[in-house]
């Protein structure tokens, strides 16, 4: 998928992304700070029926949400500086659980991303418009 969208179109974009990537448990969100990674993840969790409060796990590293399909692990790797730190934090266990993992800042520990990954790249066009590009990377 590749398109421009505004915030009032986000549910349509999230629905299309879910249709494309729902069979891939690991989703990696690449985007500069303030582009809307957490907003996109919040909209995705709303689509999936998550009733928990969805927020960025910057300090906790991982937030877990429940939905009809199981668990969602929302991860923020912004503060991670090494593979060893990520393993000590138990990140790899979540990635191998088979549950949906939504990862912000995956570029900070790229060696953890093995197997198929659904990549979402967001960029800012202007204050109200974003660009999304998604693909499955093996």
Image: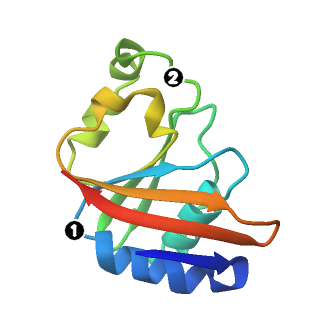
Front one among 102 and 36: 36
Picture coordinates of residue 128, whole percent (x, y): 79, 72
> Which of the 4 image quadrants contains residue 41?
bottom right
Crowd rating for badge 2 (residues with CA inside 10 Å; few <14, some 14–19, many 20+): some
Picture coordinates of residue 35, whole percent (x, y): 68, 55
In the picture as drawn, the residue positioned furthest to the right comes out as: 127
- Mark 2 to mark 1 CA distance (whole Å): 27 Å
Front one among 65 and 118: 118
Q: Is residue 38 visible?
A: yes
Q: Give the residue number, with chain letter if any, for mark 1.
A: 23
Left or right position of 15 against 123: left
Left or right position of 26 against 51: left
Question: Which residue is drawn at the image coordinates 49% and 57% (left, top)?
Answer: 121
Question: Which residue is drawn at the image coordinates 29% and 27% (left, top)?
Answer: 111
Q: Is residue 54 visible?
A: no
Q: Give the residue number, with chain letter if any, for mark 2.
A: 80
Is residue 77 shown above or below 130? above
SS for callout 2: loop
Left or right position of 138 against 132: left
Mark carried by residue 97:
none
Is residue 39 shown above or below 20? above
Picture coordinates of residue 84, whole percent (x, y): 35, 13
Crowd rating for badge 1 (residues with CA inside 10 Å; few <14, some 14–19, many 20+): few
Front one among 106 and 85: 106
SS for callout 1: loop
Picture coordinates of residue 106, whole percent (x, y): 44, 38
Number of numbered labels in the structure image: 2
Which is nearer the N-term, disc 2 or disc 1? 1
> Which of the 4 image quadrants contains residue 15?
bottom left
Contact check, label 2 and label 1, Cβ < 8 Å: no
* Quadrant of the snapshot with the N terminus: bottom left
């Amino acid at each position: 998928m590749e398109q421009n969208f505004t915030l009032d179109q986000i549910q349509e974009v999230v629905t299309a992304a879910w249709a494309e990537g729902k069979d891939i448990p690991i989703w990696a969100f690449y985007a500069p700070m303030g582009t809307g990674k957490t907003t996109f993840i919040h909209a995705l969790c709303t689509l999936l029926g998550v009733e928990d409060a969805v927020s960025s796990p910057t300090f906790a590293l991982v937030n877990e949400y429940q939905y009809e399909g199981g668990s969602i692990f929302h991860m923020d790797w912004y503060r991670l500086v090494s593979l060893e730190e990520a393993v000590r934090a138990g990140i790899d266990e979540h990635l191998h659980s088979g549950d949906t993992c939504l990862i912000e800042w995956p570029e900070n520990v790229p060696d953890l991303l093995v197997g198929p990954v659904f990549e979402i790249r967001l960029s800012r066009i202007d204050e109200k418009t974003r660009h999304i590009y998604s693909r499955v990377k093996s």
